[in-house]
Image (cartoon, rainbow, N blue to C red):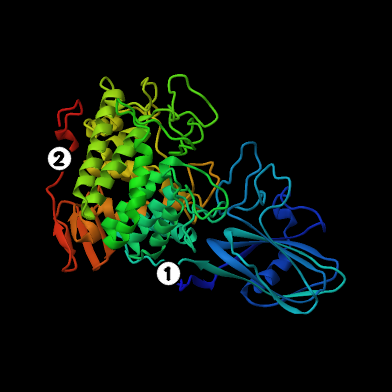
Amino acid sequence: MPSRLPAPAQRWAEGARVRHVAEHPAGQPTHDRVVDPADHLDDEAGDWQQLIDGTAIVLPPRTCRRVLIDLDQYVCAYPVLDLEGGRDAEVRLHWQESLYETGPQAGKGHRDVVDGKLFGRQGLEEDGLGDLFIAGGGRERHSTLWWQSGRYVEVLVTTAAEPLTIAGVRFRETHYPYEDRSGFTASDPRLAEVGVLAFRTLQACSHETTMDCPYYEQLQYAGDTRLQCLVAYTTTGDDALARQALRAFSRSQGDDGLVQSRTPSRQASPIPPFTLWWVAMVHDFALWRGDLAFVTDLMPGVRAAIDAHRRTVDDRGIFHALHGWNFTDWVPGWDAGTPPGIVQDGEEHPDWPGPGRGVTAVLQLQLAMVARQTADLESWVGEPDAAAEYARLADRLVEAADGAFYDADRRLYADDLEHTAFSEHAQSLALLAGAKYGETAVRAMLQEPPGTLARTTVYFDHYLFEALQRIGRTDVLLDRLGLWFGLLDQGLRTVIEHPEPTRSDCHAWGAHPLYHYIATLLGVRPTSPGMATVTISPRLGGLEWAHALVPTPHGILEIRAEAGKPATFTAPAEIAVTIPPPLRSAADIDVGGNQ
């Protein structure tokens, strides 16, 4: 079959620097040996740098050298190694996103620093990721069948009885051919700098499929993919990879109505909330890209997904979580990322018999929000009766949430029925789901002292930002971008998985600020399929100005917003633009509930 995807973007990585050259005992591991400046062979470093720049180097027989290359950028690349002679010599190329500090509980520290660090985290029993090439003695070009990823490459060369000529070490970068067409700029230059990191993250996590991260799983997860697609819609106008993902999750759907949390994958990992995020992906595609014929083909799976969850809604309207890993966010203190009230598979809870695995407002409100999106989808594909049915389900769920989880004393939604735990997640989803006290709860959340609510992290910050957009508090959004601004100060080239200490230095979901530059700060939001109608409602949050180009199915929409002035824009003729009235200020809102 002809490929539905364009050929990947490929180019030779440029700007690599040799940071360390040292003798190394042949046959010994490197993971437990720090990069010691005292070991650096300064007289050889220039020759190795010339090799990176294209000039051959010759190593004598019975020699072992350890060379650390800094690519100065996060890359996904096929290593290409040109060798001559040196039969039985070994050239090993290993990869890391960053080097690691050596102290107790140490992390990675500043990503530009290599001296005094380990090429691999503490506790490793063997050296890490990479490839071993063995010279055959002739003139040879070696590469790999799949790419590697990271910023740092450790070259370990061990020659045998013959001298070895290394004629070239190059890295052929590869990723899905996304190009940032948005050109977002603002009065705070840090936003554009973060945008570069975020878009690089999107590229590094986009190949034949979307990926959560290129260094570890390399898997297409629904929760991650939803945010990647939103970024792609608002910055590139390219939806081919999104269509691939939507089809792939649809094909993975089981008889129980749940899609695989990640697909394609040789191992199943059920994450029921990610089935709902796949439904939200269908809704996003309909709004931002259109093609309702494609959406209609996905609707049987959408209905099955919602029905799978509706089956465990009890007579009170309370949703009982499904079996599986009910991951929501990497919140410190939550059990494997699941919110309070959820029982992990293999455990029992006396208060929640039956098919479910616990009760929490977070999943209750997520289901309500996505049921309401499903009602939209049904109306768009010409099924008004089904649309009304899913709207009633959403109303029933939020009404039950208002009664069971809303804490009138704190003006917040509790995570659990006992009202012992509260989170930014529940407040954000309450507003997005249309709960009665949703706006009250989000405004009350902003007045809570630090540490009293579980805080959203990199991934779920997206849903917090969506809630802040609803009430016009983009000043808080800009403040929460402090985590992203801090990445610039730590030498990162991509966005991390979660707050430090982080596992992954490049995680797809961290690119979502690019979406919010367009959809939240500049306020460009489609209100009907295919962006046939769009609202433009800038909320600069203290910025003096912002400007961007927005790729749409009909052409480029250009917008510029300045504080205190009406936004100016040009839009394709096929798009009907509405400028809604400004939101009331926070001072005009009684947080006690009178809205």
User: What x and y, as percent, mark residue 295?
Assistant: 31, 58
Q: Quadrant of residue 274?
A: top left
Please give the name of the residue rendered at 51% of the width and 72% of the height, measured from the top-left corner.
10
User: What x and y, as percent, mark residue 382?
Assistant: 21, 54
Q: Residue furthest bottom?
A: 139
Q: Does residue 79 appear in this view? A: yes
Q: Nearer the viewer, residue 146 or 215?
A: 146
Please give the name of the residue rendered at 79% of the width and 74% of the height, measured from the top-left corner.
136
Q: Which residue is mark 2?
A: 584
Q: Amino acid at mark 2?
A: Arg
Q: Residues within 10 Å of mark 2 (few under 14, many from 20)?
A: few
Q: Which mark is residue 4?
A: 1
Mark 1 secondary-structure assignment: loop
- Whether residue 529 sits left or right of residue 60 in the image: it is left
Mark 2 secondary-structure assignment: loop
Q: Does residue 475 appear in this view? A: no
